[in-house]
Amino acid sequence: MLDRICLILAIIGTLNWGSVGLFEFDVVAWLFGGSDSIISRIIYVVIALAGIWCISLLFREREEIVERTDQ
């Protein structure tokens, strides 16, 4: 379950970066009062931690990942 939550957060982060790159529009900052607000900074950190967690998916055996999703 943690893998899925982290993957969803990482996807949200990539979509936000895509909007920054394409449209110069930061969705997180817009929703939570600017990029310097404490809530935005917490969200940025949580998404970064989720992305770091997703790195572990690269080093896991394929069978282990399939086993966890079947449960």
Image (spheres, rainbow, N blue to C red):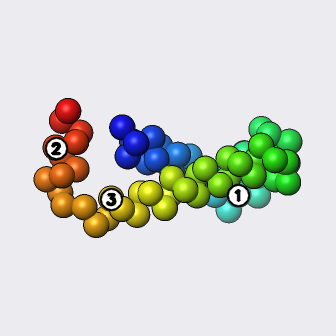
Residue 32 x %, y %: 80, 40
Q: Any mark on residue 20, and which?
A: 1
Q: Residue furthest top?
A: 71
Placement of the N terminus among the 4 image quadrants: top left
Mark 3 element type:
helix
Which label sits in the foreground, 2 or 1?
A: 2
Mark 1 element type:
helix
Q: Any mark on residue 57, and which?
A: 3
Residue 39 x %, y %: 77, 43
Residue 10 x %, y %: 51, 51
Q: What is the CA distance from the residue labelled 2 to the residue labelled 1? A: 36 Å
* Neighbour tally class for label 1: few under 14, some 14-19, many 20 plus, Cα within 10 Å: few
2 and 1 marks in contact (CB < 8 Å): no
Q: What is the CA distance from the residue labelled 2 to the residue labelled 3? A: 13 Å
Q: Residue furthest left?
A: 63
* Neighbour tally class for label 2: few under 14, some 14-19, many 20 plus, Cα within 10 Å: few
Identity, as a three-letter code, of the amino acid under mark 1: Val
Identity, as a three-letter code, of the amino acid under mark 2: Glu
